[in-house]
Amino acid sequence: MSEPEATRAYRGVAPADRRAERRKRLQNAVIDVVADEGWSAATVRKVAATAGVGPRFFYESFTDMTDLVTTAYDELGATLLERAVDAIAAAPDELHAKARAAVGAIVGAVERNPQQGRFLISDAPPLAERKSAFIRSAADELAKQSDAVGTRLDSRQAELCAVVVMAGAVELVRGWLDGTLDIRPDELTEIVASTLSTLTAHMPTIGR
């Protein structure tokens, strides 16, 4: 009896590795489709074709398009947040320096891959809840990092700060990427970092 297809290597690549590659290609494809054409264009057939895989392979990793788009958002958001945390760790122990490092890491990533930025700020309905979850994650990290610079924020204060900063940052990034705002990446970084550091410094006195 021949080895089952599900466990047989193909051209030296194990089935699990092939599935992981297809999964990643589908995630990259939905990012591109949503960024370029919007959520309404993100059908299984369209995304699978963009990924270069057969539609049947879509369902080996995802239950539906909502599952795919939210997974792509969560993983991309986690990657960007991790880059920001790494940048904070390498920055001097000064509030604005750490804010600038964190924001700069994210702006730099978007500058290198604008499609990811367009995807993150898209209005795809399934992402509304995930965006709220991302803000909560950012707020949790802000609360942790605030101790390092002597400005302790509780969870409520950190969430309020994160909501304000994220809302402004999204519109700045949107204008930057679609060309409606005359702004350079370094200017965007400084504006958002200044907002973040100023609000963080004052939040203990206004957020209790």
Image (spheres, helix red, strand yellow):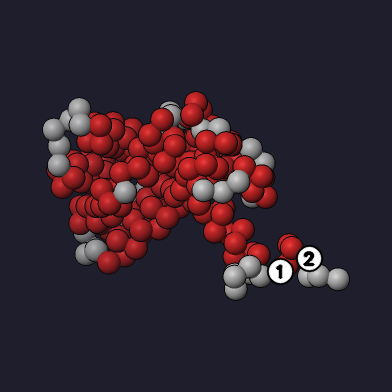
SS type, badge 2 = loop
C-beta proximity under 8 Å, tags 2 and 1: yes
Q: Hey, which quadrant is residue 191 in on the image? A: top left
Question: What's the CA distance linking mark 2 and mark 1?
Answer: 6 Å
Q: Hey, which quadrant is residue 179 in on the image? A: top left
Task: Please provide percent x and percent y for residue 58.
Answer: 62, 45
Task: Please provide percent x and percent y for residue 195.
Answer: 23, 40
Is residue 29 visible in this depiction of the protein? yes
94 or 117: nearer the viewer: 117
Q: Residue extending furthest right?
A: 1
- Please tell me how crowded label 1 is: few (under 14), some (14-19), or many (20+) other residues with Cα within 10 Å: some
The amino acid at mark 2 is: Pro
Residue at label 2?
4
Question: Image point 20% across, 27% down: which residue?
Answer: 180
Q: Is residue 164 above or below residue 68?
A: above
The quarter in which the N terminus is drawn is bottom right
Question: Image point 50% across, 26% down: which residue?
Answer: 40
The amino acid at mark 1 is: Arg
113 or 171: nearer the viewer: 113
Question: Image point 50% across, 47% down: which residue?
Answer: 51
Q: Is residue 162 above or below residue 17?
A: above
Task: Please provide percent x and percent y for residue 86.
Answer: 34, 63
The quarter in which the C terminus is drawn is top left
Residue 160 is left or right of residue 125, and the answer is: left
Q: Which mark is residue 8?
A: 1
Task: Please provide percent x and percent y for residue 190.
Answer: 17, 45
Is residue 206 visible in this depiction of the protein? no
Question: Image point 24% across, 63% down: which residue?
Answer: 91
SS type, badge 1 = loop
